[in-house]
Image (tube, rainbow, N blue to C red):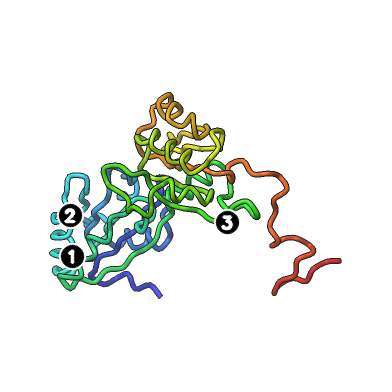
Amino acid sequence: MDKTNSAKVYFVGAGPGDPDLITVKGLKTLQKADVIIYTDSLVSAALTESAKPTAEVFKSSGMVLEDMVELMVNSVKAGKLVVRLHTGDPSIFGAIHEQIVLLKKQGVEFEVIPGVSSAFAAAAALGIELTIPELTQTVIFTRADGRTPVPKKEKLSSLAEHEATLAIYLSATLASKVTEELLLAGWAEDAPVAIVQKASFTDQKIVRCTVVTLEDALKKNDIKSQAIIFCGYALEPPQGNVSKLYDKSFSHGFRKAKK
């Protein structure tokens, strides 16, 4: 049942770049919105063209937190449906927590509608699976320690010791630090790395390199922002690693093993 008709705030994941990658629910909510606040530095403006003619559309790049929340609160109190349109999925580096805290203080109802993270669009662009049987079954979403510090227990060198697939956000200008931390964790110098800039946009860029050539690869390709850096052996897995799911000798609730 569609309940997106009430006056409240909807945090909607716009997806990674391609306007077609917004979810059906996200698009339907966007089309009903009276007020749209969108991350114009990252979200395709084409999505706002789906808004109804009477909708008010605001760009968030020139706003501070208090500006956005005041606009949302006043709009909801006026009986309007508000969409706060975030890039990717709002739950990953989306800065929605601070907005939600202030909305709760004002007694304003909200809902989060998930979206496609840029990491998943980047993996799709590379044509890879991030979890390979008997090689790695874990993906770590993180960032390098920069202007926004990370907790001491989440230093990249500590996380990298697992040798799981790393999806590193917001770190294109911190390549030397990424390399240093991976080597400190014991990674091989030639361990595979892939960079995807502007995943799913028409000007998407893909660069493959290694741990020690990461900084040089970013500089040569003039990549300074909007990039996901993948590190890990799932990028170049052995051919023999296959799952049990489709193995003919493996039984499960929907299929019996074949002899």
Few, some or many C-alpha atoms within 10 Å of disc 1 (few <14, some 14-19, many ≥20)?
A: some
* Residue 234 relative to residue 98: left or right: right
Residue 185 in picture, x, y percent from top left: 48, 44
Type of amino acid under label 1: Leu
Report how far apart the C-alphas of labels 1 and 3 lie in the structure: 37 Å
Looking at marks 2 and 3 on the same chain, the residue that comes earlier in the sequence is marked by: 2
What number is the disc on residue 102? 1
Q: Amino acid at mark 2?
A: Leu
Any mark on residue 137, and which? 3
Separation of marks 2 and 3 at Cα, in angstroms: 37 Å
Tell us which disc is closer to us: 2 or 3: 3
Q: Which residue is mark 2?
A: 65
Distance, label 1 to label 2, CA atoms, is 9 Å
Q: Mark 1 and 2 residues: CB-CB less than 8 Å, in contact? A: yes
Is 157 left, or right, of 82 in this rendering?
right
Quick one: label 3, few (<14), some, or many (20+) residues within 10 Å?
few
Q: Is residue 203 above or below residue 250?
A: above
Residue that appears at 43% across and 46% down: 157
| SS type, badge 3 | loop
